[in-house]
Amino acid sequence: MQGVPLTAIGISHHLVSLDDLAGLTRVAEQVTAALDADTSLLGHVLLTTCNRFEIYFEADSFHGALEDVLGTVRASLPAAAGRLVEQFEVYPGQAAVQHLLEVTAGLDAMVIGEAEIIGQVREALAAAGSLAGPSLTRLFHAALTTAKAVTAQTELGAAGRSIATVGLELVEKRHFALAGRRALLVGTGSYARVVTAALVRRGCTDVTVYSPTGRAEQFAATHPVRPVGEEGLAVAIAGTDLLVACSGGAATTGSLIGAGLLADARAGVLAVLPVLDLSLTGDIDPEAATLLRVDLIDLEEIGAHAPAEQAAAVLAARDLVTRGVDTYLHLEQGRAATPAVTAMRAHVSQFIEREIESANRRYDAETAAAVARSLRRVSNALLHTPSLRAAELARSGELADYSHALQTLFGIEIEAEA
């Protein structure tokens, strides 16, 4: 589509299992490094969450770039997992814009309206940095702006739901209210902050945190939690009422919390321990589900218990997304006129500046300044309508005739925008 040379590819929980998504997450750094080295791309952003793996990119050649990016992902995966690439969905041009705005607004999430996705999209853009390129940077900012509007103006956003809140609600439904209970948090990443806030809101004021990377004390310095080290982990597991794992790490050498550790730590404890594993790659050994007094709740189960969509709220959110897409496209397509408008203004400015120089030589400083202000005001007024007309023609695909007229009538050469 003219003015929007962007493409998105990716896969989500709608098409593959969370185990498959976890495999993609493990090679995210390798994929990013390869994309960074691909000079054919004008910009790229990798977005990974607990239920999606997506790449947004800009390139001059659609088909060539698409095959290159898909090939990059395929080459990064183990041979047995290469089949996943064949299931990637492709969103070209306007479809990519629509998709990102829907994703960022929480309309394509495992839990419709989840709040965490806004932060994840923002972090993806920040991680890409200058390699995102100007077009993708503007697109991601448009998506974030639309998502904030959904949060502020619809009941979808007002609900404040997330995978963490659904998981904690499931714990309360199955076991006990969390108010006054003890909780052990495994992980100190961005999602750990969300979980900590959700626990505190439910009155769970005795929260300890364990970090497999040794960041527990640093996390505890800025959050209402107590740190626990490796040596105290078993004791913390024995004494807690709830275990929540959300390290977000892409572990490839086994789970962070083994079934054996849980069994030994809980030996002699009669109460059932609810264990929420919110990590896509699985922080808790799946064998823990076979333990008699452990109730392991993973992302698959949380997704199955996610609340049904609220029709009115979803419709309102989709309306805001549609308006956000229209606004973005309107502005982007109008940007195609920028080189023509710039060239036209530069052409007129040459004559204005010559007259100002002449006035400076002929008149006193005060009079010359008044002449300069008058000339610039008149030139801005004269160029206003042609500039607007250029943007309108750019949106309708007729800018070429406008540019040709400028060259024919005034000899204005228009350089393509960098």
Image: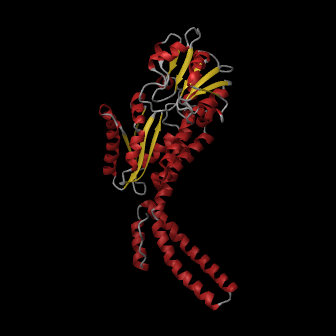
Q: Which quadrant is home to the N terminus? A: bottom left
Question: Would you place residue 414 above or below residue 313 in this image?
Answer: below
Q: Which quadrant is home to the C terminus? A: bottom left
Camera sees residue 350: yes
In the rendered structure, the answer to whether residue 145 lies left or right of residue 31 reads: right
The image shows residue 261 at horizontal and vertical percentages of: 50, 17
Count of numbered tags: 0
Residue displayed at 35% across by 41% down = 73
In the rendered structure, the answer to whether residue 199 lies left or right of residue 307 reads: right
The image shows residue 124 at horizontal and vertical percentages of: 49, 44
Residue sitting nearer the eye, 100 or 54: 54
In the rendered structure, the answer to whether residue 145 lies left or right of residue 281 reads: right
Question: Would you place residue 252 above or below residue 142 in this image?
Answer: above
Residue sitting nearer the eye, 40 or 302: 40
Residue sitting nearer the eye, 345 or 27: 27
Residue sitting nearer the eye, 412 or 73: 73
Camera sees residue 105: no
Question: Would you place residue 133 above or below residue 214 in this image?
Answer: below
Residue displayed at 69% across by 20% down = 180
Q: Quadrant of residue 320?
A: top right
The image shows residue 358 at horizontal and vertical percentages of: 58, 88
The image shows residue 111 at horizontal and vertical percentages of: 52, 31
Q: Quadrant of residue 170?
A: top right
